[in-house]
Image (spheres, grey):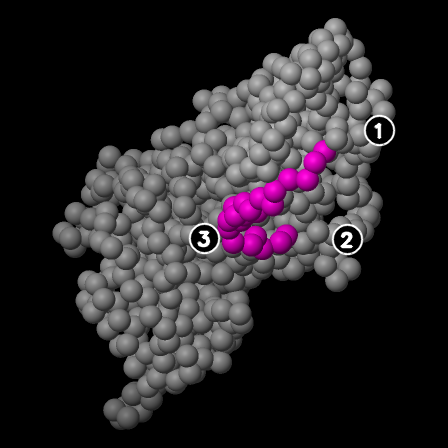
């Protein structure tokens, strides 16, 4: 048979056999597929047949291999070789409900170990609060982390940290349903939850402007300065100057800003959008910081929009790199976030990115002093900030200035400006030239209401009307600042920076506030009051009064002649500000009369005509003497009804212009027979004398009668003409005093009745009332709304009712019949 023929046959035979085999396999394959489908359905509804509980997730098994063993195995090449997963494949690894990690394009596994076994030092100033969760197979992937909040953890200080192979880094996160959640983050090699402790060195700083200075009392506490201010101008130009302060135990950061009356967003946009301008601007900033000797830069650029967020972050990163090259630090000031639909909006400032780049982040907190209670707005802001920025980089930015709020608008101002609402000093009654026994009343002309304690702000406030709107003004003090500083302490932040303290003259109380951040007690609340004092020429206090509503002051029945100064101060704790001054001269009419009498006695020695007349009449001396003796005998029998209380002139008529008969000595008994029409002069005859004349009424002690009992007489005692006497040279009166306005007094518009406000968190201080010598004679009407009684709820910071401030130092002073010294200033 031919070969080709057999060959064709063989192929045909194999083909037939193959077809027969295939026909047998098809039914078998269908049977197997049916069996597998049934088994799958059975396991889907009965997973316990394989030992799987119905509610147990099917996840990657967490390896129990210790970290060190995993690393050794990888180095030895014993790890399993697997193909890279697809980029769109999600990999997830869980450790029960305590930890989970997920990422696309990775093959993840997770293990749990202890801090000791992990073998790496923990982040500084932290305590481990969870196991160390070790992650394998990330391969640089970006994904999500979930760590259960440890039992008993303090939410105020709980943080998430990740190990990147060389160091621990802070991981921005937020707490959701009991888990610390970090989304879209680089998957690290290990993750831990920690309780962050207070830093070993707490930053305590103040802002110092060119017109200010560091208060000497604060030098023991402060370790950081923000020195201002350079201002961003067009095309990246830097305007102004900010010289360094004297070197000390503190770091100095040069502050540069685009804020002022308005925020200069145009100049900032120019820097962000023009790379050449930005490069030149960064070079200028670094040069200014380096050449002046500063430790770093405080970048306070505000107003970046959400669309500029990436550009602003890139600018901050470039600036940080340039500063680091010169061993200089970067601090960035971030603005208050806005709460929008329950979410915090930081606009163009990416807090998480800025927190990674900067060495320090200054967080501007609300200037509203009522926002600082536990759980209040400021507390919420800090709690959010610590989820985005490493709390050991965070510094709260506070103010010690006065705050003015009208409606929703709120602003800060120097305390001295806030005191201007108390008005100017005006004279209501009296004047600057007074006599002993007179009274004077003065008052402040401003529109401010009485001082009122605000427990939620831990300070005093007042209100005033302007353009039909009611303003509320809070005046800061040491205890209020201490209250706000506690926020940084409660969250274990890096520290606090305070504006407005560079204008202090007395800083001892604020030193105590700073000390309370570390180990000292917070200063107790101090009373605020308007303090009125009268001091003599020697500086001794002769009268004083204080109170939160003492807008007027009366000095009644002035007891002593002299030169006096009246001062009205606003006092808040140890700090005082002068609101007005007035000088008063008080004369003694008796002393004036005596001085004039002495002048007249000296002048009377020049009178010779009376003496000559007496000598001419000496020839008839015997007759005259007999007649005089008879008259003297009659007068000696009269009963005296007055006694001279001081040596004085015995005049021939009721006035200083009349001639002097003689000088009567102190204690001379007198027969008082009449008075002049004004009651200023008395007609008298000395006992034992036949001469009737006149003496000054205030120098006579009447016995058995009053001035009203005496008749007005025209008898001048036979007054004779006297020689012309030279007029005494007037005493110099000194410079003319500038008059203080004297009425008509201002009229106060009654305050509208206001709705009761929320209850404060601390009891209001009470001021001990001080009685006035006499009721005011012309007190202007002030009508204030009725105050709702304060509740007795304990304060957030213990504030026992403070006493009113004492008058300025200068010795003893008398109030309401009680004498006080500065050793015990309670009134």
Q: Is residue 8 magenta?
A: no
Q: Is residue 526 visible?
A: no
Residue drawn at 14 percent across, 52 percent down: 76
User: In what quadrant of the picture does the N terminus appear?
Assistant: bottom left
Q: Which residue is mark 2?
A: 744
Q: Determine contact: label 2, label 1, CB under 8 Å.
A: no
Q: Is residue 369 left or right of residue 329?
A: right
Q: Nearer the viewer, mark 1 or mark 3?
A: 1
Measured from the top left, where is residue 510 in percent x and y?
A: 42, 40
Splitting the image into 4 quarters, where does residue 643 fall? top right
Residue of label 1: 712
Tell me if 165 is positioned left or right of 693 in this view. left
Mark closest to the chain's N terminus, 1 or 3: 3
Percent from the top left, x then y, of residue 383? 50, 47
Instruction: Provide the residue designation for mark 3.
Output: 500
Part of the protein shown in magenta? 719-740
For the C terminus, give its image quadrant. top right
Q: Mark on residue 202?
A: none
Q: Earlier in the sequence, mark 2 or mark 1?
A: 1
Q: Position of residue 175 (x, y in %)?
A: 51, 46
Question: Majority secondary structure of the magenta segment?
Answer: loop
Q: CA distance from mark 2 to mark 1?
A: 39 Å
Q: Quadrant of residue 370?
A: top right
């Amino acid at each position: 048979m031919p070969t080709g023929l057999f060959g064709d046959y063989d192929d045909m035979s194999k083909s037939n056999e193959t077809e027969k085999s295939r026909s047998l396999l098809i039914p078998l394959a269908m049977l197997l597929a049916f069996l597998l489908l049934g088994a799958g359905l059975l396991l889907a509804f009965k997973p316990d047949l394989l030992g799987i509980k119905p509610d147990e997730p099917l996840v990657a098994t967490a390896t129990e291999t210790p970290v060190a063993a995993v690393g050794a195995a990888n180095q030895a090449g014993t790890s399993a070789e697997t193909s890279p997963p697809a980029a769109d494949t999600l990999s997830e690894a869980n450790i029960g409900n305590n930890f989970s990690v997920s990422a696309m394009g990775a093959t993840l596994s997770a293990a749990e170990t202890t801090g000791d076994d992990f073998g790496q030092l923990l982040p500084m100033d932290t305590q481990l609060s969870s196991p160390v969760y070790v992650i394998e197979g990330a391969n640089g992937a970006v994904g999500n982390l979930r760590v259960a909040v440890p039992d008993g953890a303090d939410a105020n200080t709980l943080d998430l940290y990740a190990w990147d192979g060389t160091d621990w880094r802070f991981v921005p996160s937020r707490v959701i349903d009991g888990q610390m959640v970090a989304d879209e983050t680089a998957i690290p090699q290990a993750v831990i939850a920690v309780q962050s402790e207070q830093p070993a060195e707490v930053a305590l700083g103040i802002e110092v402007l060119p017109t200010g200075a560091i208060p000497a009392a604060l030098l023991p506490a402060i370790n950081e300065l923000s020195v201002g201010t350079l201002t961003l101008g067009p095309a990246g130009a830097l305007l102004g100057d900010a010289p360094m302060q004297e070197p000390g135990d503190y770091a100095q950061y040069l502050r540069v800003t685009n804020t002022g009356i308005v925020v200069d967003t145009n100049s900032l946009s120019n820097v962000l959008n023009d790379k050449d301008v930005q490069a030149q601007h960064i070079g200028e900033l670094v040069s200014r910081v380096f050449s002046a000797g500063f430790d770093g830069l405080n970048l306070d650029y505000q107003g970046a929009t959400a669309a500029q967020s990436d550009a602003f972050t890139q600018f901050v990163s470039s600036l940080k790199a340039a500063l680091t090259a010169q061993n200089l630090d970067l601090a960035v000031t971030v603005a208050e976030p806005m709460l929008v639909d329950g979410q915090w909006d930081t606009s163009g400032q990416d807090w998480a990115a800025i927190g990674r780049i900067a060495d320090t982040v200054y967080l501007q907190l609300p200037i509203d002093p009522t926002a600082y209670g536990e759980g209040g707005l400021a507390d919420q802001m800090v709690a959010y900030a610590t989820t985005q920025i490493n709390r050991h980089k965070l510094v709260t930015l506070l103010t010690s200035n006065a705050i003015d709020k009208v409606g929703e608008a709120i602003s800060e101002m120097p305390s001295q400006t806030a005191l201007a609402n108390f008005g100017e000093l005006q004279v209501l009654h009296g004047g600057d030239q007074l006599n002993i026994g007179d009274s004077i009343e003065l008052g402040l002309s401003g529109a401010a209401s009485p001082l009122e304690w605000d427990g939620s702000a831990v300070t005093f406030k007042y209100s005033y009307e302007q353009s039909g709107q009611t303003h509320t003004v809070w005046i800061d003090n040491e205890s209020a600042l201490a209250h706000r500083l506690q926020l940084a302490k409660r969250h274990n932040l890096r520290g606090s920076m305070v504006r407005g303290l560079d204008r202090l003259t007395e800083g001892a109380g604020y030193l105590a506030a700073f000390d309370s951040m570390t180990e000292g007690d917070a200063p107790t609340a101090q009373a605020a009051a308007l303090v009125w004092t009268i001091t003599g020429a020697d500086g001794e206090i002769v009268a004083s009064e204080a109170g939160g509503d003492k807008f007027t002051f009366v000095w009644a029945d002035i007891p002593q002649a002299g030169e006096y100064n009246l001062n009205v101060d606003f006092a808040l704790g140890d700090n005082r500000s002068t609101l007005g001054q007035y000088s008063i001269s008080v004369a003694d009419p008796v002393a004036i009369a005596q001085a004039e009498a002495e002048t007249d006695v000296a002048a009377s020695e020049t009178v010779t005509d009376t003496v000559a007349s007496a000598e001419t009449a000496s020839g008839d001396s015997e007759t005259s003497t007999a007649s005089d003796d008879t008259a003297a005998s009659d007068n000696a029998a009269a009963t005296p009804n007055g006694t001279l209380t001081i040596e004085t002139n015995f005049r021939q008529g009721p006035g200083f212009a009349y001639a002097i008969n003689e000088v009567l000595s102190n204690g001379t008994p007198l027969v008082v027979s009449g008075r002049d029409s004004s009651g200023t002069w008395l007609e008298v005859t000395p006992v034992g004398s036949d001469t009737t004349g006149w003496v000054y009424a205030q120098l006579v002690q009447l016995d058995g009668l009053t001035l009203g009992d005496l008749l007005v007489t025209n008898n001048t005692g036979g007054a004779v003409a006297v020689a012309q006497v030279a007029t005494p040279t007037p005493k110099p009166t000194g410079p003319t005093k500038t008059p203080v306005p004297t009425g008509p007094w201002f009229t106060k518009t009654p305050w509208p009745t206001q709705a009761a406000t929320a209850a404060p968190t601390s009891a209001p201080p009470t001021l001990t009332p001080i009685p006035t010598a006499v009721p005011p004679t012309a007190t202007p009407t002030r009508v204030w709304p009725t105050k709702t009684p304060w509740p007795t709820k304990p304060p957030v910071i213990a504030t026992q009712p403070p006493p009113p401030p004492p008058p300025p130092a200068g010795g003893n002073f008398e109030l309401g019949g009680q004498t006080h010294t500065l050793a015990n200033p309670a009134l």
